[in-house]
Each structure stands twice: as C-alpha cells, then as structure tokens.
Image: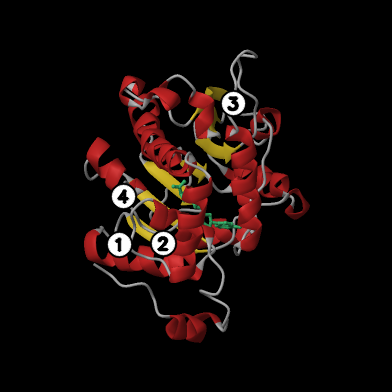
C-alpha cells in the first residue's frame, strides 16, 4: 500500500504550498470510493457531502462503475485495445488497465493523464508496482493543452496513432468551465483520433424527474448544493444539459447513450436499492459515447 505523497514533498515538486489546504476533487473522489490517498480536508469534505446528500456516494460509485463498463464495451463491441484516460484521477478500484486486462488479458495499452501532480504521482507508483511498462503509462498534462498532451502521450510509444483509440473523458468535462473553452480542445482530439475511435464522456447534469407525477423529494435541491460545494475545492464543478453534453461528441456517430450511469449497460439494475432502481436519474451523471466515422 502506498502512502499519500507528503505536503512537503509535493511542495518541493510543484513549488506550491497550498496543496492539501483545500479538498481536491481527485482526492475527494478517491476517498469516497474507498481509496487511500487523501488528506483530512478531503475526508471532511466527503463526510459533509454524505451528511447533506444521501445520494452522494451513489452518484460517485455509479460513475466509477460506468468507467469499467466503457472499457468493456469498447473492447467487446468495437475491438478497441488502446485507451487514453484523461482526468484519470487517483488509482482506486477498477482502474482502466485492470479492467482492460480482465476483458482482454495482455492485449490492451492504457495511457493515464491527469493535471493533478499527486494523482499522476500515485498512478506512477501503482503502475511501477503492478503494471506492464510496455503497455501502461501515466502522463502529467492538461486536457486543455490538447496538442501538448497528445505529444506527451505519443512520446510514451505505447499508442499506435493509426489504430482506433478509446478516448475517455469520464467525470472530467464538468470540471472545465465554459470560459476555458473545452470545445476547442475537443475539436483537436476529435480531429486527431484515428477513424473508428471512440470518445466516451460522463458528465453531471441537472434534470427534473422524467415523470411529472414523480416527486423528487428534495433530491435536486440537495444535488445543486453538493455541486455548489465544489466551489470550495481546488476545482469548481458545472452542470450541463444533455444537449450540451451531446454537442461535445461533435460529428461523431452516437453509438451509446445518453444513459444514466447507474443503469447504463449494468447487467442487473434489479440489485440496486429500490430508490435507485426505479429512479435512474438520481445518479445525476450521463454517459454517452461517439464513434469517429
Ligand atoms: C472525479 S475525477 C474522475 C476520475 C475518473 N475519470 C473516473 O471517472 O472515475 C476527475 C479528474 O479530472 C482531473 N482533471 C480536472 N481538470 C483537468 C484537466 N484540465 N486536465 C486533466 N485532468 C483534469 C482531476 O484532477 C481529477 O483527477
């Protein structure tokens, strides 16, 4: 088991001394999913969210489940063996390379990318302990600096640029505000991906229950408060409508979704607790996949 990188070490590496003063979405997510890499501020943030919103863990876990099913779907339905996971976060259960190795043992290559140094440091530690350096790498880069990110990933020489790739942007884009122009970066990635590639997105949204008679019992008000609370972390979060999320796929053919993460390609949603089984929208995150024609 690896320890979280100390604040002193991180300050040395990053030149930043504020690390660990505010919760970070990467560490918050890791802690909420049972991971080991977090600081007291992250734990406190999760505890506050759980106390205020009983759906909080369900929302995060449903998204993480969808990450694994994207990998399975891409390989089984499209024969894809190359994955670039941008906004990969801290290693936790069901990392992309682990799922890929279960689905297609020894065949898949995975590049993890995050712009949080601590997330990348931990990914490197995990990969050095348990992965195959010929097939798995972690890269420190920013989604928004698309060309630079792409060059860094290609420099690892595990991705073949002429073969289809599954580009995963799972629970990433809602951390990018409109002002940062995520569309420009997306345009670059859609353009450079080889034909037959998949673009997989999961994104938070805010939707009324589909059945007008159905009461939301305060679910949406609590969800809005949860998302607002992220303004007190290192990275604020932003809702987008399903139309905006669809727009991120550009001219790619929509092959999956939009689906609610708690139900999308889940073998047996019947095992979910009643309130989630009958109300998929309570997972509040949509997953959608496009394919480059
Ligand atoms: C909630 S985690 C998602 C982890 C994983 N993709 C999943 O869905 O299970 C979001 C991650 O996006 C990363 N992130 C946020 N903005 C980013 C950016 N501009 N470039 C790269 N990564 C970013 C954060 O550091 C964090 O690790």
Disc 2, SS = strand
Question: Any atom of ligand 1 within 8 Å of the CB at mark 4?
Answer: no
Label 3 residue near ligand 1, CB within 8 Å: no
Find residue 216 and name its label.
Answer: 3
How far is the residue under mark 1 from the one under mark 2? 8 Å
Precedes in sequence: disc 4 or disc 3: 4
Q: What residue sits right under mark 2 in the picture?
A: 138
Query: Relative to 293, is 45 above or below?
Result: below
Q: Residue furthest right?
A: 179
Q: Which residue is mark 4?
A: 93
The numbered mark, 3 or 2, whose residue comes first in the sequence reads 2
- Image side of residue 204 versus residue 137, left or right: right
Q: Secondary structure at mark 1?
A: helix
Question: Which x, y percent locates residue 151?
Answer: 55, 60
Q: Are marks 1 and 2 in contact (CB under 8 Å)?
A: yes
- Residue at image mark 1: 127
Q: Residues within 10 Å of mark 4 (few under 14, many from 20)?
A: some
Residue in the foreground of this view, choosing between 235 and 138:
235
């Amino acid at each position: 088991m690896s320890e979280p990188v100390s604040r002193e070490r991180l300050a040395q590496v990053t030149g930043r001394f504020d690390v660990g003063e505010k919760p970070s979405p990467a560490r918050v997510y890791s802690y909420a999913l049972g991971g080991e890499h977090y600081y007291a501020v992250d734990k406190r943030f999760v505890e506050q969210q759980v106390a205020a919103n009983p759906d909080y863990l369900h929302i995060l876990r449903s998204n993480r489940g969808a990450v694994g099913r994207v990998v399975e779907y891409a390989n089984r339905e499209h024969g894809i063996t190359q994955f670039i996971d941008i906004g990969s976060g801290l290693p936790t259960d069901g990392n992309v390379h682990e799922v890929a190795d279960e689905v297609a043992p020894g065949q898949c290559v995975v590049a993890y990318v995050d712009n949080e140094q601590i997330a990348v440091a931990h990914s490197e530690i995990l990969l050095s302990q348990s992965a195959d350096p010929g097939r798995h790498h972690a890269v420190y880069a920013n989604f928004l600096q698309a060309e630079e990110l792409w060059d860094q990933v290609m420099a690892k020489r595990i991705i073949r640029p002429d073969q289809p790739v599954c580009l995963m942007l799972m629970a990433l884009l809602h951390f990018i505000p409109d002002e940062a122009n995520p569309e420009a970066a997306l345009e670059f990635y859609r353009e450079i991906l080889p034909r037959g590639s998949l673009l997989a997105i999961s994104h938070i949204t805010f939707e009324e229950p589909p059945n007008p008679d159905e009461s939301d019992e305060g679910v949406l008000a609590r969800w809005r408060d949860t998302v607002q609370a992220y303004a007190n972390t290192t990275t604020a979060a932003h809702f987008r409508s399903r139309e905006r999320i669809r727009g991120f796929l550009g001219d790619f053919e929509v092959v999956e979704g939009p689906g609610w993460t708690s139900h999308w390609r889940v073998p047996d949603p019947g095992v979910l607790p009643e309130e989630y089984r009958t109300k998929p929208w309570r997972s509040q995150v949509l997953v959608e996949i496009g394919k480059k024609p």
